[in-house]
Image (spheres, grey):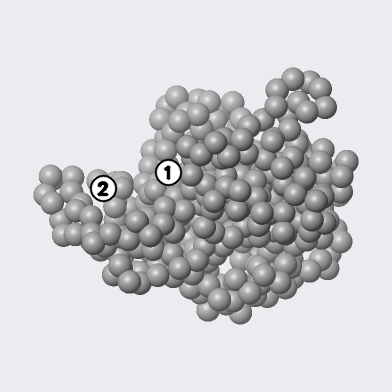
Amino acid sequence: MKVESNESEPETYGLCLMSATDSLKLVAIGGGTGLATLLKGLRLYLKPESVRAGTATTSSSGQTKALRPEPRLASLTAIVTVTDDGKSSGRLREEFGVLPPGDIRNCLVALACEDRLMTRLFRHRFSGGGQLGGHSLGNLIILALSQMSGDFLKAINQAGELLGIQARVLPSTLEQVDLVAQVGGKTVRGQVAIKSQRAPIHHLSLVPPNVRALPEAVEAILAADLITLGPGSLFTSVISNLLIEDLAQALARSRAKKIYICNVMTEADETDGFTAVDHVREVLKYGRGLSLDYALFNSSPISPEMLKRYAAEQAIPLDPPQSPGLESPPVKFIALPLASEARAVRHNPERLSRAIFEIYHGLIP
């Protein structure tokens, strides 16, 4: 039995979402560009002007459907992994002992208005081979704020104020932590070193192993109505958060609906040869009591040009699973046309966020 997808209407999947007075608390967990992509779509539902009387939709046959009230978020919290040790983040981490700011900066920028000067400044990356070469100005601003206050979390909040965002961005922990993996028959420490092995990851853990989750992150999880995990690199962006014991426990205790969002493409340095179901099983394995309600996959075809480009990186499209879901533990599989192509194959932020709301409200069969 194949998972059903709606190819004819890529922008909308149902007739209505919720009344304009309804709202929910959403927590998005992950890292890297995947989480930032999701947040870019979700931020539109934080603005008061997004709650309109309704929006007319048109089907592929040209018929106008009923008005659909726009959803809104009562709160949006991003919980971000802090295990990155490469590029600008790695250099700042090594030189100043600060938590890696790169993934956090990406999330802050994704939640900000794109045409603001401050957003463009946070996004700016210095060129050249000198000491500033390769550094993101946003990373340096977060570092400066952290040094001024002596508080990394306060620095993130202040950066959010500078960008005018309406959501919270939280590190999963405030402790310095490294990923350790069994790769190719040897123990490898550090995210960059692990990914450079380009071999299957058989076991992933943290050093030190008993780091404490940020209390605000635990509180957000327990108060959430809806929790998403991903998209992003399976091990280094998603599972890295689940390795924090009290964060995993909070996810297991949470009564929120939970959706795992799978990547569009495989990654040779993490998931080469993995099926869609393999991704879900790894999340559940490391989740230690985590129960997923849904797993969301892309069903949009990838262009021949992009297939050729990704083949050079030994990456291929991740085909949606051919069964309706896992029976034990119960996870419902949903496949929808979510991918877009520009410089890379990514989820379309608007389609992805819309799909999440409709899944939450049971509008996708």
Looking at this rendering, what residue extends furthest in the top direction? 128
- Residue 85 found in image quarter: top right
Left-right relation of 46 to 255? left
**Which quadrant is home to the C terminus?**
bottom left
Mark 1 or 2, closer to the camera: 1
Q: Where is residue 274 in the image (x, y as percent from the top left)?
A: 59, 48
Which residue is at a point 59% across and 60% down the rendered structure image? Answer: 168
Q: Position of residue 342 (x, y in %)?
A: 45, 30
Which residue is at a point 67% across and 40% down the rendered structure image? Answer: 138
Element carrying mark 2: loop
Q: Position of residue 106 (x, y in %)?
A: 61, 44
Left-right relation of 314 to 192? left
Which residue is at a point 53% across and 79% down the rendered structure image? Answer: 255
The residue wearing badge 1 is 348
Residues at discs 1 and 2 in contact (Cβ within 8 Å):
no
Looking at this rendering, what residue extends furthest in the left direction? 63
Choose between 292 and 170: the one closer to the eye.
Answer: 170
Residue type highlighted by circle 2: Glu
Choose between 134 and 151: the one closer to the eye.
Answer: 151
Left-right relation of 236 to 292? right
Residue type highlighted by circle 1: Asn
Q: Where is residue 251 in the image (x, y as percent from the top left)?
A: 61, 72
Choose between 217 and 140: the one closer to the eye.
Answer: 140
The residue wearing badge 2 is 9
Distance (Cα) linking label 1 and label 2? 14 Å
User: Is residue 323 positioned above or below 146 on the image?
Assistant: below
- Does residue 3 appear anywhere in the picture? no
User: Is residue 139 positioned above or below 67 on the image?
Assistant: above
Reading the chain from its start, which is encountered first: label 1 or label 2? 2
